[in-house]
């Protein structure tokens, strides 16, 4: 199989426009810009140091040609180091079967968390630019908003057979705050017109699956409690989240501590 990175894709489609910003306009600003310039029916998001399997691209093209109700395709991923070597134990959704979901909240609830990793996300360009501009999205995870919007408005395919290779190293600085940018993540849910309860369900699922963002230091309980209350009362957290996160996240953190102690004893 051949691996495609940004440079390869730019060369293969060199007859199409290529844009480079004069200054850093941010993740959301960049996404809005390319959406405004695109005339294609679909867009595909790719980080500059990640690699797509050619088979993933061909399979995705076959799917959207055969079914115009598909609005989103999501891949699995594996982590690689700077030399291109697979990082043992890294990745998500590996060796899972291909699955599809009809439009609606269950689709969003299941799949929006997968959009934390942006490379390989394929989205149907249906009023997405208008939606993201109207919502005034301005955070580091605009792909969660556009993926969620697509999940609400059409079929989603999870295509894990050909994982994206994602470069992972310690040189990247995403400026994670004390709550692991969960406030940025939650902003996307707050702008989708969901009920407070549905927002909380999405927030809870995302936080559970990526609890490392705020519960990473088991030896500093006061720091963890401070992080828990910080996300519980963040402006982008839902009303049920304000009420329930102190209890839910405290229980989740205590569970991590107990498991770690049991593991050490073994």
Image (cartoon, helix red, strand yellow):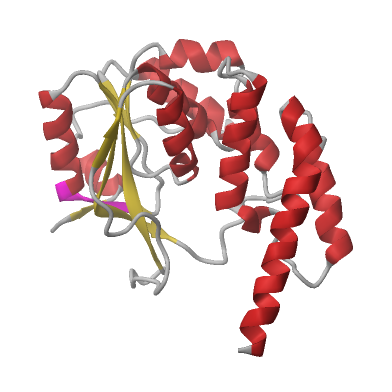
| Picture quarter with the C terminus | bottom right
Q: Please tell me which residue is depicted at 32% across the width and 20% down the height of the picture.
A: 154
Q: Position of residue 202 (x, y in %)?
A: 57, 34
Describe residue 22's horizontal placement relative to residue 248 as left or right.
left
Is there any visible trace of residue 19 in the rendered image? yes
Q: Which quarter of the picture shows residue 34? A: top left
Q: Please tell me which residue is depicted at 54% across the width and 14% down the height of the picture.
A: 133
Instruction: Say if 35 sits above or below 141 in the image.
Output: above
Q: Position of residue 8 (x, y in %)?
A: 23, 47
Looking at this rendering, what residue extends furthest in the right direction? 222
Q: Which quarter of the picture shows residue 244? A: top right
Q: Please tell me which residue is depicted at 71% across the width and 72% down the height of the picture.
A: 258
Q: Which quarter of the picture shows residue 221? A: bottom right
Q: Position of residue 9 (x, y in %)?
A: 24, 42
Instruction: Say if 1 sits above or below 58 in the image.
Output: below
Is there any visible trace of residue 236 in the rendered image? no
Q: Please say whether residue 10 is one of the residues in the magenta stretch.
A: no
Specify the segment rendered in magenta: 51-55
Describe residue 145's horizontal placement relative to residue 178 as left or right.
left
- Prevailing SS of the magenta stretch: strand
Q: Position of residue 73 (x, y in %)?
A: 29, 35
Describe residue 141's horizontal placement relative to residue 121 as left or right.
right
Instruction: Say if 109 sits above or below 2 in the image.
Output: above
Q: Please tell me which residue is depicted at 13% across the width and 41% down the height of the picture.
A: 58
Q: 155 or 172, which is in the foreground? A: 155
Q: Please say whether residue 54 is one of the residues in the magenta stretch.
A: yes
Q: 42 or 196, which is in the foreground? A: 196
| Picture quarter with the N terminus | bottom left
Q: 129 or 194, which is in the foreground? A: 194
Describe residue 9's horizontal placement relative to residue 241 as left or right.
left
Instruction: Say if 191 sits above or below 90 in the image.
Output: above
């Amino acid at each position: 199989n051949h691996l495609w990175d940004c440079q390869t894709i730019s060369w293969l489609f060199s007859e199409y426009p290529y844009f480079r910003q004069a200054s850093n306009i941010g993740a959301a600003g960049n996404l809005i810009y390319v959406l405004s310039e695109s005339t294609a029916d679909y867009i595909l998001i790719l980080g500059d140091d990640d690699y797509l399997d050619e088979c993933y691209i061909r399979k995705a093209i076959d799917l959207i040609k055969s079914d115009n109700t598909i609005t989103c395709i999501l891949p699995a991923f594996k982590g690689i180091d700077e030399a291109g070597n697979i990082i043992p134990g890294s990745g998500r959704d590996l060796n899972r079967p291909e699955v599809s979901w009809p439009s609606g909240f269950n689709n969003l609830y299941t799949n929006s968390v997968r959009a934390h990793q942006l490379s390989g996300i394929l989205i149907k360009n249906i009023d997405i630019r208008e939606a993201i501009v109207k919502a005034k999205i301005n955070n580091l995870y605009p792909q969660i908003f556009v993926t969620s919007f697509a999940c609400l408005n059409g079929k989603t395919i999870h295509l894990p057979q050909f994982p994206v290779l994602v470069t992972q190293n310690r040189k990247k600085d995403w400026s994670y705050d004390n709550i692991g940018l969960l406030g940025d993540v939650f902003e996307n849910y707050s702008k989708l017109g969901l009920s407070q309860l549905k927002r909380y369900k999405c927030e809870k699922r995302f936080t559970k699956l990526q609890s490392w963002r705020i519960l990473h230091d088991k030896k500093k309980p006061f720091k963890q409690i401070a992080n828990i209350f910080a996300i519980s009362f963040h402006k982008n957290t839902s009303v049920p989240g304000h009420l329930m996160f102190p209890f839910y996240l405290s229980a989740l953190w205590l569970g991590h501590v107990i498991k770690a102690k049991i593991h050490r004893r073994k």
